[in-house]
Image (spheres, rainbow, N blue to C red):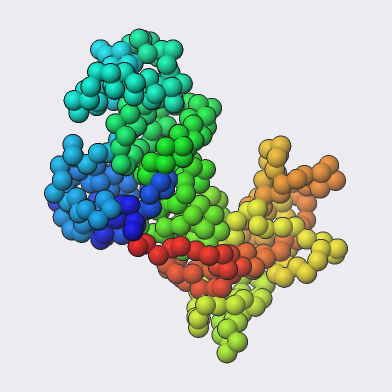
Amino acid sequence: MAHIKIEKVSKYFDDIKGVDGADIAIEQGEFFTLLGPSGCGKTTLLRTLAGFYRQEEGHIFFGDQKIDDVPAYKRNIGMVFQSYAIFPHMTVFDNVAYGLKARKVSKKDIEKRVLEALEMVELTHLKDRQPAQLSGGQQQRIALARAVVIHPGLLLMDEPLSNLDAKLRLKMRSDIRQLQKSLNITTIYVTHDQEEALAVSDRIAVLNKGKIQQIGKPHEIYLAPKNKFVANFIGTTNFIEGDCSNYKEDGTATVQIAGISFEVSLNSSYSGKAIYSVRPEQLRFVDETSSEPKAVVAGKIIESTFLGEKVEYQVKLSNGQVVQVHEHNIQFKDLRTDGDQVKIDLNPEYAVMFDQQGEEVINSHANSKAKTSTKAV
Ligand SMILES: Nc1ncnc2c1ncn2[C@@H]1O[C@H](COP(=O)(O)OP(=O)(O)OP(=O)(O)O)[C@@H](O)[C@H]1O
């Protein structure tokens, strides 16, 4: 049985649907991330789970217990927010002890558990300090210790790293993940940062306008996006418009893109405009020696940016469209410069093709062979 089950939950603010029919089942110990742009409903869903909002539709279960009518303070949830929300007038120790005192835990047990929690976040040596004497990263660690010290059944984190600088963010996200794994706490994490989501999550739900677009493991979301929104929101991709025609019994059809045409396998019959999505690192330059290029199109490099581990090229195709190509493992001899004429394999094997509206995947691409868990419940 799922540890947390969100069943067709909708939360309205007058006529705005903050969350629209969310269906999610989360396993014990899972690190589950709600990812999406500003205003997509991440915080609303988190606050509904916490019991700060009451959903208008649907139900929430913790195990087999329906908790729709359980007040927030009885849900046994630990929370960490973007603003550290720690008490400025209390010491680090007292901040962490707060939830235990409220639960009338004995003084001896409070001492033991607070020290354990501070040890986990490596703050034992600062236990007598006031929060104002601590850095942002240290303050967020107090918030984390305070959330886990109550031994919550569920840990909710709302953009906990957004106030930290880039380097500290990387360190903290890996610390959070390790702590979460070692405690095996089911965690729901909110972020709008797709790289962060890919790095920390067991699974991700991508939201847009209150609706879940896709649920899957990080690689599934990245390699097999279910619609144009997800392909665009996660990572970088090239969208190339084309036409799909001539569907045959064997499941193949002809796609015309950027002045060339080639065969693709479709999931089912389709003809009409299509949107072809291919990631910059999946595109490759080809020459006479390349093995089996499938869909070669000519172009000219109009901008190259050397970034050490990779070079990012902007390539203008012969039909005028500009695509991004990222090359890794660069050797001196491979470097290309502005104005170079190149040929690119549009590589249908790894591309995802959407219908004209960008709502459905129409091709059966290599990535669809990966097992996907896009079903919500
Ligand atoms: N208290 C409220 N009253 C009215 N509308 C609200 C309220 N809270 C959220 N909304 C609306 O509900 C939608 C979802 O908001 P929410 O804060 O959940 O988004 P979010 O994905 O967390 O965004 P952000 O990343 O900017 O925090 C938005 O359209 C927002 O304007």
Side of 141 relative to 97 (left or right) = right
User: On the picture, is 214 further left or further right than 88?
Assistant: right
> Is residue 10 visible from the viewing direction of this image?
no
The answer to whether residue 349 is left or right of residue 203 is: right
Q: Is residue 94 above or below residue 72?
A: above
Quadrant of the rendering where the N terminus is positioned: bottom left
**What is the x, y in percent for residue 181?**
46, 40
Residue at x 38%, y 25% (from the top left corner): 117
Q: Kindly indicate the quadrant of the structure image that contains residue 56.
A: bottom left
At a point 33% along the width and 11% down the height, the residue shown is 130
Q: Position of residue 282 (x, y in %)?
A: 65, 57
Which quarter shows the C terminus? bottom left
| Residue depicted at x 55% and y 73% | 363
Where is residue 273 drawn, in percent x and y?
50, 74
Snapshot quadrant of residue 319: bottom right
- Nearer to us in this view, 330 or 341: 330
Residue 158, above or below 372 = above
Image-quadrant location for residue 77: top left
Depth check, front residue: 213 or 307: 213
User: Residue 228: where, in percent of width, then height?
Assistant: 46, 61
Q: Does any portion of residue 215 appear in the rendered image? A: yes
- Position of residue 278 relative to residue 244, above or below, is above
Q: Is residue 241 left or right of residue 336?
A: left
